[in-house]
Image (tube, grey):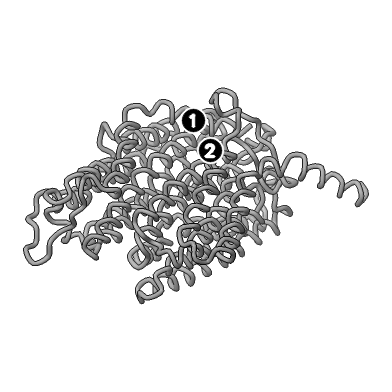
Amino acid sequence: MTFHQLLNDVLADTTGVSLGAFRPERTVCATIVALLLLQMIFPRWKSGAFYAMLIGTAAALYLAIPAQLSDPTQTPAPQPIFTGLLVFDTFSIYMRCLLLFFLLLFTGFTQVSGVPDREDATEFYVLLLGATLGMCLMVSANHMLIVFLGIEMASVPSYVLAGILRNRSRSSEASLKYAVFGAGAAGIMLYGISLLVGVLGSAHLPTMAARLADILQAGPADYSMVLILGGLMMMVGLAFKLSAVPFHFWAPDVFEGAPAEVAAFLSIASKAAALALLVRVALGFGFAADPDALAALEPARHYIAGMIGLIAAVTCTFGNLAAYGQTNMKRLLAYSTIAHAGYMMMPVAAAVALVGNDAAGARLAVATLAFYIALYMFMNLGAFAVVAFVRNAIGTEEISRYAGMIHRSPGVTICMAIILFSLVGLPPLAGFAAKFAIFAALVDAGLLALLVVGGLNTVLSLFYYLRVVKVMVMSPELEERPTAEIPLLSIPAVYCLALTLPVIVLGVLFGGLFDWAQAAASALLI
């Protein structure tokens, strides 16, 4: 093939296929430019950034939903775009829609809570959009270059967001700690990627899997230890984004120092994108279309499933145990986020374990993860919203100051109690349906030890979530320090109610959402 033919093929692929599939990301980029121009042209229009953000995010979400998905049984076939750097399939469509829908909810949350203030709104929203753009690349990654680029595009704006409150030393400390630890994790991950690419001779995930199958078919090699080490080092970067043990140490300090709004963004959007990328990488190295290559990859699948399962078990156990002694609500939710990261890694281990024998079961395991992420979005955003509104009312996030809230803020208290019960996984709330789904996937995969760990951790989590409810409902209000008063007919209370209703409704009527999740996973492993 001549250079002229190669250039024509690249241009035809880019203009004919790739740019059309990339419309939501292009809209996000256009919104960033619009926000910056708006600040230059209309510097005195302080609300302009919010409206531009709202319109741009809604437009990106609209473009992210293809016409075929109006019927979950009619889904587009997987399609490599940009010469195979990204893949456009139902899973990437679902995750992009989820991220953009969350960004839409989150934009409204920032307007209601008042963070950021109007002076910093443009910078704040530009950073949010930049991070979301990186996350959209993560969920569609089909090449090691995009894996690293997506993680860094999502991480660097997050470091700045953690320190958005410039006048608070704790916020600046959180930002610096997050950036230092993130840089270290990124360096280790990049070195691991270089080892894998160097041994396998490619950075394209499907090609790397085929080369790995050839190596495993040939028998033990001198560089098998290099492959194992490269996989472990790459997992460092993914575990850091997931705040999985032992790379969780940044999360409690960053969540406590950053505003509750930023903590909510990190705990939901960042986790969702990292989990989607974990699915891409884990299944990418464990699956090959050729039956002989698929059989040869069995040792790799055993190694990946064992590593992910072990990290998941340790992560959810540590997160739940460490949450017991917390007195700050944001630190408690940080450890809760760590625990839920462990729960959500479990179906990934189940999917990898099932790939060789039951591709349909593996897709179902991924569907349970997609289902869990959607429900987790409402639960965690609702919890952090309550924290932010209580902070605005009384100026603190200490759990002891929630005492007697049921008397002054009955609506918000009831919403918070429902959300916390759902995070535990109590029926008939959405959290129960989510955990039941992933536990069923563990049973299908035969990972009974992981199932026992998940069940015991669900019981453990009940106690520290109930402690918060007890303080709000049963503890007497402190006489010298009145608790938060948020009227039932107020915008914050209505916002909390809007997030709590899906937690209640989807606990019973979850069939439609689960169908969407199954449609999202239907194009994987084919």
Badge 2 density bin: few <14, some 14–19, many ≥20, Cα 10 Å: many
Q: CA distance from mark 1 to mark 2?
A: 8 Å
| Residue 516 badge | 1
Horizontal and vertical percent position of residue 164: 43, 68
Horizontal and vertical percent position of residue 300: 58, 45
The three-letter amino acid code for the residue at tag 1 is Trp
- The residue sitting at 21% across, 63% down in the picture is 394
Q: Is residue 423 left or right of residue 350?
A: left
The answer, for residue 322, to whether it is visible in the render is no
Q: In which quarter of the view is residue 437 placed?
A: top left
The three-letter amino acid code for the residue at tag 2 is Tyr
| Residue 94 badge | 2
- The residue sitting at 42% across, 57% down in the picture is 243
Q: Are marks 1 and 2 in contact (CB under 8 Å)?
A: yes
Which callout, 1 or 2, points at the residue further toward the start of the chain? 2
Secondary structure at numbered mark 2: helix
Q: Is residue 140 left or right of residue 497?
A: right
